[in-house]
Each structure stands twice: as C-alpha cells, then as structure tokens.
Image (cartoon, grey):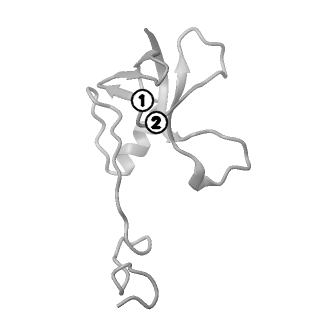
Amino acid sequence: MKKIENWFVSWEKKDGYTAPEMRRKAIIGQVEDAPPGHDLQIILTARVQIDGRIITTSDGDKYELGQPEPGYLEWLCASGIEYDEAQPVKLVMKLRYGGLDGKRPPNGGRGPGSN
C-alpha cells in the first residue's frame, strides 16, 4: 500500500475555467516514489471509503495517509478544528442560512414573497 505524504483536504484542482461551486472536495498529496510535482488527487465522493488513515478509491486502490502538510495543520488550528491522528479526514456538511453570519433570513429562507 502506498503512502500519501504532505497531504491536505481542499477543493479539487481543475482547469482555470471551472466555476468554484462545481468543484468537489479532494485529498491532495505526494505519493511515495512518485516524481516531484506529481501530486495525487483523490476526489472525495460517496464511493471513496475512509477508514482511519486508510483511503480506498472507487477503483479499489488503497493509500495510507502519512503526515499532513504543515500549513494544513496550521489552518485547522486557526479554524478551531481539532486534528485527530486516528481519524484525520472527516467530512462534515453544514446547512447555512443567510449571509456569512449564519443567521436565518427574516422570512425563514423560504424565498421572496413566501408566507
């Protein structure tokens, strides 16, 4: 099983023309024995299984997560997200209402003119 080092979770790398809302979350990192600059990108979909530090792709390939990229750990800390060595990748979905403050719009988010 190959190991992914200097990994982080981010939005998938695409061409410069894809709208941000069309990109998906991905684990991006360096696979051992790969040439420099050839980062692996695993798109996180329902078919990708994460069991602790082991990732199984939809093709059945297995990878072990090594050490995360130091900047990613700094970002987690600054964002108030605790890093868990045993389960380092957690997918969390949040439903947000309203603007950046997270408050529900005055009409409850039902759309204009709703009663």
Q: Is residue 34 above or below residue 46?
A: above
| Image quarter (top left, top right, bottom left or bottom right) of the N terminus | top left
Give the residue type at disc 2. Answer: Leu
Q: Is residue 32 above or below residue 20?
A: above
Q: CA distance from mark 2 to mark 1?
A: 6 Å
Q: Residue 93, image x and y in percent?
A: 35, 52
Horizontal relation, residue 26 to residue 19: left or right? left
Q: Residue 44, image x and y in percent?
A: 46, 36
Q: Residue at x 45, y 14 (%)?
A: 3
Q: Secondary structure at mark 2?
A: loop
Mark 1: few/some/many CA within 10 Å (<14, 14-19, 20+): some
Q: Secondary structure at mark 1?
A: loop
Name the residue that disc number 1 marks.
48
The residue closer to the viewer here, 31 or 55, is 55
Q: Is residue 100 above or below residue 47?
A: below
Tell me the quarter of the picture where residue 67 sits.
Answer: top left
The residue closer to the viewer here, 91 or 68, is 91
Q: CB of mark 2 within 8 Å of CB of mark 1?
A: yes
Q: Is residue 97 above or below residue 110?
A: above
Give the residue type at disc 1. Answer: Val
| Image quarter (top left, top right, bottom left or bottom right) of the C terminus | bottom left
The residue closer to the viewer here, 34 or 46, is 46
Q: Residue at x 32, y 50 (%)?
A: 80
Name the residue that disc number 2 marks.
44
Mark 2: few/some/many CA within 10 Å (<14, 14-19, 20+): many
Tell me the quarter of the picture where residue 36 sits.
Answer: top right
Q: Residue at x 73, y 50 (%)?
A: 17
The residue closer to the viewer here, 61 or 53, is 61
Horizontal relation, residue 67 to residue 15: left or right? left
The mark tally for this picture is 2
Q: Residue at x 33, y 31 (%)?
A: 88
Q: Residue 7, image x and y in percent?
A: 48, 28
